[in-house]
């Protein structure tokens, strides 16, 4: 048998079809290339219109740019762009540790009118509302904050506020008529024992809980001299931290005078160790512009061990702590 011969049919493109295909491929390729080019150009034009591009072009870092965009309204960003140059003030403000978004405009306003104040102070002053001037804005203290209730020259307690757990302080370590919250006295007692055993000094409670009426009478006595004098030396009724029942004016049996106590070893010890018992030095030196009070070596406030330790470690006042960690 003869093997069948297989015939393979060969397809041949006509030259005209071949030319057409080459041409079509070329046109398609060119179109894709052009399309990519044009869409990239459009993307770039669009990017040039973004705040991200405009702000970074002025010299703001990507991080600053993103922060500004996230916290400011478009109109405000436009204003910044209209300055037509990099403004380091914005960079410094938004990068402060205790920066709070919604205070941005107040920081800027304050810093412009107080150029000598540091950025750190600017942030702290605005955060605690001190940029408004003492007693010029008022908030009711939130008693639900418990041991962290804030009372200062902006936050006040109402006339009838009184803790229910006030206890008489033991006369072994307190002058007569001292009352404070139970937990405050317990912690003071432990602290006192430690100081007695290690420094051989007897800490004493000089003053503690004061009612609204007590404070009113103190304040009015000063006010008979002048309002300015009264505000300098006493809190207005409702605005005294002593009404919380969480504050103690501490002294020692050995150094009862203010000056002697301030220079004593026990005061130095308290300053660096009271937080272990939940107390903070409430009006530290150099923080008058934030607390509204000249430094008081005797006035300690109970806030609990954890918060007291954090406040001590961060070197901030309770007002700053409250603004950033609670009210924000
Ligand atoms: Zn006091």
Image: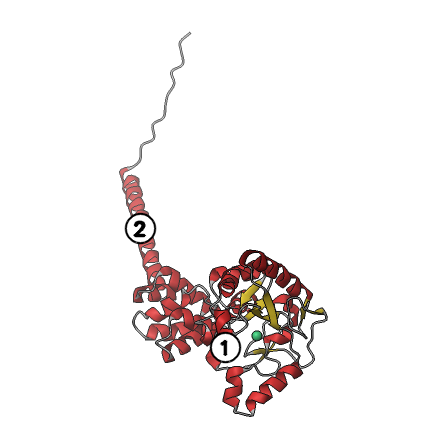
Q: Residue 92's image quarter? A: bottom left
Q: Residue furthest right?
A: 164
From the viewer's side, name the closer residue of 176 and 246: 176
Residue beneath disc 2: 33
Query: Across the whole image, how many numbered discs are drawn on residues?
Result: 2
**Residue 227 shown left or right of residue 167 in the figure:** left
Contact? badges 2 and 1 (CB < 8 Å): no
SS label for mark 1: loop
SS label for mark 2: helix
Residue drawn at x 60%, y 61% as measured from the top left: 192
Q: Residue furthest top?
A: 1
From the viewer's side, name the closer residue of 326 and 256: 256
Location of ligand 1 given as a quarter of the image: bottom right
Mark 1 crowdedness (10 Å alpha carbons): few <14, some 14-19, many ≥20? many
From the viewer's side, name the closer residue of 162 and 13: 162
CA separation in Å, label 2 and label 1: 72 Å
From the viewer's side, name the closer residue of 301 and 201: 201
| Color theme of the render | secondary structure
Let me know if residue 204 appears in the view.
yes
Residue drawn at x 69%, y 72% as measured from the top left: 163
Let me know if residue 73 appears in the view.
no
Image quarter of the C terminus = bottom right
Residue beneath disc 1: 293
- Residue at mark 1: C-beta within 8 A of ligand 1: no
Mark 2 or mark 1, earlier in chain: 2
Q: Residue 38's image quarter? A: bottom left
**Residue 201 shown left or right of residue 110 in the figure:** right
Residue 208 is situated, as x and y percent measured from the top left of the image, at: 63, 73
Residue drawn at x 48%, y 59% as measured from the top left: 313
Residue 258 is situated, as x and y percent measured from the top left of the image, at: 51, 74
């Amino acid at each position: 048998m003869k093997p069948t011969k297989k015939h393979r049919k060969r397809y041949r493109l006509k030259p005209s079809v071949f030319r057409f295909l080459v041409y079509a491929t070329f046109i398609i390729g060119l179109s894709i290339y052009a399309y990519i080019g044009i869409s990239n150009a459009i993307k770039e034009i669009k990017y040039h219109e973004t705040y991200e591009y405009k702000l970074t072009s002025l010299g703001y870092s990507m991080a600053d740019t993103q922060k500004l965009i996230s916290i400011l309204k478009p109109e405000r960003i436009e204003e910044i762009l209209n300055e037509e140059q990099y403004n380091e003030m914005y960079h410094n403000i938004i990068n402060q540790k205790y920066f709070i978004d919604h205070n941005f405009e107040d920081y800027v306003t304050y810093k412009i009118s107080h150029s000598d104040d540091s950025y750190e102070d600017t942030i702290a002053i605005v955060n605690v509302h001190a940029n408004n001037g003492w007693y010029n804005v008022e908030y009711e203290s939130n008693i639900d904050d418990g041991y962290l209730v804030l009372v200062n020259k902006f936050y006040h307690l109402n006339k009838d506020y009184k803790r229910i757990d006030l206890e008489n302080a033991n006369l072994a370590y307190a002058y007569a008529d001292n009352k404070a919250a139970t937990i405050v006295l317990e912690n003071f007692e432990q602290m006192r024992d430690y100081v007695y055993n290690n420094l051989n000094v007897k800490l004493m409670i000089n003053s503690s809980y004061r009612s609204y009426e007590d404070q009113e009478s103190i304040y009015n006595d000063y006010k008979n001299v002048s309002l300015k004098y009264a505000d300098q030396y006493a809190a207005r009724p409702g605005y005294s931290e002593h009404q919380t029942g969480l504050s103690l004016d501490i002294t020692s049996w050995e150094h009862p005078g203010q000056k002697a106590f301030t220079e004593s070893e026990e005061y130095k010890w308290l300053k660096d160790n009271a937080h272990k018992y939940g107390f903070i030095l409430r009006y530290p030196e150099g923080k008058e512009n934030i607390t509204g009070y000249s430094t008081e070596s005797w006035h300690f406030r109970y806030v609990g061990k954890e918060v007291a330790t954090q406040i001590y470690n961060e070197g901030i006042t309770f007002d700053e702590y409250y603004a950033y960690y609670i009210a924000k």
